[in-house]
Amino acid sequence: MADKIQNAYHASKNIYDDVLTQGSFFSRMYIRFFWSGTDDNEIARKVLLYVPDGFDGHLLDVPVGTAVFTEDKWRSLSNAKITCLDYSEDMLEKAKARLKDCTHISFIQGDVGQLPLADESCDIVMSMNGFHAFPDKKKAFRETNRVLKKGGSFIACFYIKGKSKRTDWLVKNILAKKGWFTPPFPNEDQLLKILNKLYSEVDYHVDGSMVYFRCVK
């Protein structure tokens, strides 16, 4: 499974940003047809609003991906300590290239299921477009919660099943088989049960087959 994920993101490294940001006609048609027009740019904007301007604590970004959505925000938080972690070396290298001059940002190649961070060491844990790719979601939920301080924020967005037959077909028959997404995928009720068990507050929104939220530990 690990090699499959690495290979999938290696193969897509040159088109990843274009698809997410809908930078071409074909990527816009793909989003419109398979994802009901859900705009990842708008979801990313809403997710990043959960991170306060002037934030000066410790933030974990897992997976950082290529930092295509987060570059400007992370640059602006020069008083923060930001740790960017990704399993894919290809994604991590692209993020490093974007943010290499930022001394407040560090980069780690690693596994969300075994985070190399101490208990309650982060004020914010951000996971943008990550959980639908993580192979062991139980460990991912447990580890992101473990490293978060009491009163800290878990902020995320990712795919959930059961909202669109067309999207669910795409995920099952193409994205999962290629290694970009990894089952099992929670539906809305299952996800809310997980979040409400782990966190004291849950601010939760659905856009098509994508969910985005902020939880407080």
Image (cartoon, rainbow, N blue to C red):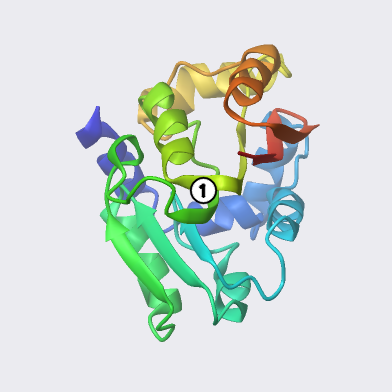
Relative depth, front residue between 217 and 203: 217
Position of residue 76 relative to residue 166, above or below, is: below
In this view, the residue farthest toward the bottom is 101
In x, y percent, where is residue 147? Answer: 42, 45
Relative depth, front residue between 91 and 144: 144
In this view, the residue farthest toward the left is 3
Q: Secondary structure at mark 1?
A: strand
Q: Residue at the location (38% across, 76% down)? A: 97
The amino acid type found where label 1 is placed reads: Lys
Q: Residue at the location (75% across, 59% down)? A: 49
In x, y percent, where is residue 204? Answer: 76, 33
Position of residue 23 relative to residue 142, above or below, is: below
Q: Is residue 86 left or right of residue 65?
A: left
In x, y percent, where is residue 11? Answer: 32, 47
Q: Quadrant of the N terminus?
A: top left
The part of the image, by quadrant, that contains residue 177 is top left
Q: Residues within 10 Å of mark 1 (few under 14, many from 20)?
A: some
Q: Residue at the location (42% across, 54% down)? A: 121
Relative depth, front residue between 19 and 127: 127
Q: Is residue 154 left or right of residue 35?
A: left
Q: Which residue is the site of mark 1?
A: 149
The part of the image, by quadrant, that contains residue 13 is bottom left
Q: Residue at the location (50% across, 60% down)? A: 59
Q: Quadrant of the C terminus?
A: top right
